[in-house]
Amino acid sequence: MRKLLTVLAIFIAIAALWILGRDEMVRRAAFDIGSGSIKCVVADVNTATGKVVKEHLRINVKADFVEKLTGRADERIPPAMMAEGMTLMLQLKTRARNAGAEEYAAVATEAFRMAKNGRDFAKRLTEEAGIPTRVIGVDEEALLGIVAARLKKDIPKGPVAVWDVGGGSMQITLIDDKPVFFYSSKLGSIPFKNLIVEEIQNKPGSSPNPISYAESDRALQRARAEAARIPEKEKRRLSSGEFPVLGIGPVHNRSILPQVQNKAPYTGRTSPTPSHPV
């Protein structure tokens, strides 16, 4: 199975800019603190080119930040989940250090943008765990995904569309020499799952399975309604093949790709545009 590509790959690469003037290899650990999981990659980076030379460790652990945040009147990640997140990060840092990491950095995404105490968690990680951490905006998250996808697929320039489906949010970005179109939605995989359970099925619990054909149709209608927000001009660009579509994130790599038997590119039933998971 193709390796999961997240913001981690470009985050490791861009980290090369932190130390200017040094043309050498450094082993870095990058952490992507997402809405439903934490990813860690340890890799050797060429500080002159900013490129990942060799990957030594890749870990993905479940962390239900957005699930614990959803529905809370105070709009805060609860203390127990914050403590669990801190413990997980310290454990990951230990594993990264054992893999030879010399430098550490982390980004936090949608759940921490939403939570009133999201930046408090980033500050604690920086000060207490020794992992410099920032909560990044949706535009920066999309930009990191674009550059990472270009590096991974060796498409340094030219038109490309990057479709990033994360746990808490989703972005579609069309870019050529400069950004052409940017679409952002809070309907990531976890909010969409919750929508099915709460609004379509109206049942207790957190799992939508099993899903009936009728429920599946209603969910598809909801997804199409969300997609209708994209202007027709940009839909035509996507369907024309002018912009190769690169799919990144766990939905593409862990769900869709195995279901289409690892065939890449794969084409959706309702769209002629191939998506290349990277």
Image: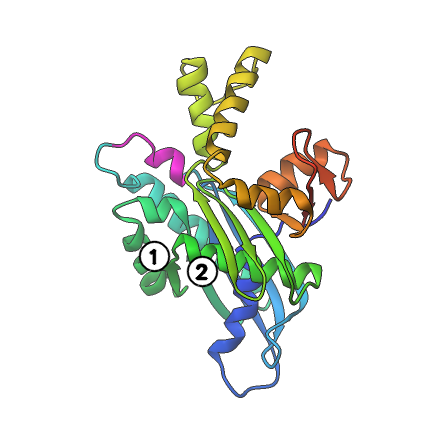
CB of mark 2 within 8 Å of CB of mark 1?
Answer: yes
Quick check: 230 above or below 160?
above
Residue farthest toward the left in the current orientation of the protein? 74
Q: Quadrant of the N terminus?
A: top right
The residue segment tinted magenta is 65-72
Q: Kindly identify which residue carries mark 2.
A: 106
Where residue 16 is drawn, which disc sits there? none
Q: Is residue 149 left or right of residue 132?
A: right
Choose between 83 and 194: the one closer to the eye. Answer: 194
- Residue 46 lies, in percent from the top left, at 63, 77
> How many residues crowd around disc 1 within 10 Å: few (fewer than 14), some, or many (20 or more)?
many
The residue type indicated by label 2 comes to Ala
Q: For the point 65% across and 48% down, which residue is it?
A: 245
Q: For the point 49% across and 81% down, which residue is it?
A: 19
- Residue 255 lies, in percent from the top left, at 64, 35
- Residue 112 lies, in percent from the top left, at 35, 48
Quick check: 210 above or below 98?
above
Choose between 253 and 158: the one closer to the eye. Answer: 158
Numbered disc 1: secondary structure: helix
Where residue 158 sits, quadrant-wise, is: bottom right
Q: Kindly identify which residue carries mark 1.
A: 122
Numbered disc 2: secondary structure: strand
Q: For the point 56% across and 17% down, which residue is it?
A: 217
Where residue 95 sits, quadrant-wise, is: bottom right
> How many residues crowd around disc 2 within 10 Å: few (fewer than 14), some, or many (20 or more)?
many
Can residue 97 be seen here?
A: no
Choose between 61 and 142: the one closer to the eye. Answer: 142
Q: For the point 49% across and 22% down, which residue is it?
A: 207
How far, Cα to Cα, is label 2 from label 1?
A: 9 Å
The residue type indicated by label 1 comes to Ala
Is 102 part of what is drawn in magenta?
no
